[in-house]
């Protein structure tokens, strides 16, 4: 008798399982379909990004090669035209190549004497919401600082330097040197000396950066 009850119980469980599967089969199929569609979309997106990056790389190399080939004897007019071509490319390119193009354009604007336009480009690259990232964004801000000295107020320049002076910044040594120069201009010699000593004593700082700090200290104490 127990065997009969067991068989009946098994049949009931089997029937309940069958009804459950029939009832929810559509949900399972839909869920599986969503997963497969998601995987397919992700693969498609990867392929699309790869294709766009390869296309951007080809265009960037062709554009910069053309600019380099015409650099001998370049005039202000050609520098400005090339800078505008780079900006136009950057407006449509993936983030990495767009950043490289904006850097190159800023250098050409600066060469052409359009310093304010170059500074605007560096500001855009170095903005907190920029896709350039801390390394390139920091470099852009450092370039802005070095070109803005003597024209922008020292307080404005120092505000741009402050985030670059933290130890986690790859540009902290150069940022401290620039901050020391501003302090020297403002007569804050003790603060400038402290910053320069910090850079000079930093074993991780490149030798030429330490030499620059020591040269400024010699000038400060001379």
Image (spheres, rainbow, N blue to C red):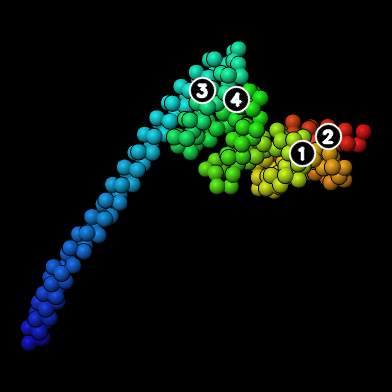
Residue bearing mark 3: 64
Q: How far apart are marks 3 and 4 (CA)?
A: 12 Å
Q: Are marks 2 and 1 in contact (CB under 8 Å)?
A: yes
Q: Residue at 7%, 87% (x, y): give it.
A: 1
Where 189 sits versus 83, above or below? below
- Helix, strand or loop status at disc 4: helix
Furthest residue toward right: 222
Which dot, 3 or 2, sits closer to the camera?
Answer: 3
Residue designated by label 1? 177
Quickly name the residue at label 4.
108
Q: Is residue 110 above or below residue 175?
A: above
Residue 26 in picture, x, y percent from top left: 17, 63
Name the quadrant containing residue 80.
Answer: top right
**For the residues marked 1 and 3, what is the alpha-carbon distance in whole angstroms?**
32 Å
For marks 3 and 4, give the one nearer the viewer.
Answer: 4
Return the residue nearer the eye: 171 or 202. Answer: 171
């Amino acid at each position: 008798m127990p065997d009969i009850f067991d068989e009946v119980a098994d049949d009931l469980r089997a029937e309940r399982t069958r009804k459950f599967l029939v009832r929810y089969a559509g949900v399972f199929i839909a869920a599986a379909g969503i997963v497969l569609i998601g995987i397919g979309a992700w693969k498609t997106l990867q392929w699309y990004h790869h294709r766009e990056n390869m296309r951007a790389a080809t265009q960037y190399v062709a554009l910069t090669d053309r600019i380099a080939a015409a650099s001998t004897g370049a005039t202000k007019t050609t520098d400005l035209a090339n800078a505008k071509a780079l900006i136009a490319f950057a407006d449509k390119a993936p983030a990495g190549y767009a950043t490289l193009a904006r850097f190159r354009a800023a250098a050409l604007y600066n060469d052409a004497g359009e310093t304010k336009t170059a500074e605007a480009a560096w500001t855009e690259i170095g903005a907190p919401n920029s896709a350039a990232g801390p390394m390139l964004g920091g470099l852009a801000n450092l370039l802005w600082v070095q070109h803005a000295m003597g024209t922008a107020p020292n307080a404005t320049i120092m505000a741009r330097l402050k985030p670059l002076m933290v130890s986690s910044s790859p540009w902290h040594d150069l940022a401290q040197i620039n901050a020391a120069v501003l302090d020297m201009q403002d007569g804050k010699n003790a603060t400038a000396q402290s910053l320069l000593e910090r850079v000079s004593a930093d074993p991780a700082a490149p030798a030429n950066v330490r030499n620059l700090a020591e040269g400024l200290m010699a000038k400060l104490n001379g």
